[in-house]
Image (cartoon, helix red, strand yellow):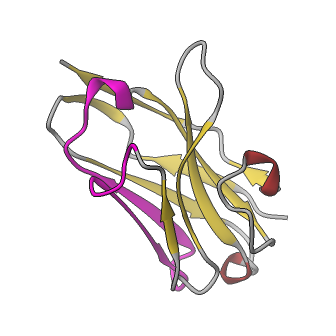
């Protein structure tokens, strides 16, 4: 069992930055690939970024590539999402997710564990 708690969301102006963090409980964190997803009102949950178990591979949605960076710290059982050059269309609830599977990491159904989400609002 893995429990995930996100933090770091908030209100930021367009062009600004935020850093989301996800703290995981349990001793199996390093055995899990981790992902970030987001869901805006009236829209489906969409993939944002993912990182492999080893941290050696990262994956990004085209819409965030070059602006967002995912990283993990297995010693602290945390995964972070650094978000730069934020735009109003990035406004959503952001969710952290964990899976023992290696792929496909862009699909929500791959993940077994989810956090409660943290709101990110970008004003224009």
101, above or below 49, in the image:
below
At x 80%, y 56%, the residue is: 110
Q: Choose top left, top right, bottom left or bottom right for residue 53.
A: bottom right
Q: Where is residue 17 in the image (x, y as percent from the top left)?
A: 21, 45
Q: Position of residue 18 (x, y in %)?
A: 28, 46
27, above or below 108, in the image:
below
Q: Where is residue 67 in the image (x, y as percent from the top left)?
A: 27, 53
- Residue extending furthest toward the top: 42
Is 8 left or right of 52, judged from the image as shown? left
77, above or below 43, in the image:
below
At x 39%, y 43%, the residue is: 63
Nearer to the camera, 30 or 52: 52
At x 16%, y 39%, the residue is: 16
Is 45 left or right of 85, judged from the image as shown? right
Q: What stretch is highlighted in magenta?
A: 63-90
Quadrant location of the N terminus in the rendered image? bottom right
Is 102 left or right of 46, judged from the image as shown? right
Quadrant location of the C terminus in the rendered image? top left
């Amino acid at each position: 069992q893995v429990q995930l708690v996100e933090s770091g969301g908030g209100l930021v102006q367009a062009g600004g930055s935020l850093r989301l963090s996800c703290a995981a409980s349990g001793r199996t964190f390093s055995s899990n690939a981790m992902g970030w997803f987001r869901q805006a009102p009236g829209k489906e949950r969409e993939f944002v970024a993912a990182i492999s178990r080893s941290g050696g591979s990262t994956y990004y949605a085209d819409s965030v590539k070059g602006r967002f960076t995912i990283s993990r710290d297995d010693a602290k059982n945390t995964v972070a999402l650094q978000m730069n050059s934020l735009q109003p269309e990035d406004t959503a609830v952001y969710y952290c997710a964990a899976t023992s599977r290696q792929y496909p990491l862009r699909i929500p159904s791959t993940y077994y564990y989810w956090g409660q989400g943290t709101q990110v609002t970008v004003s224009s």
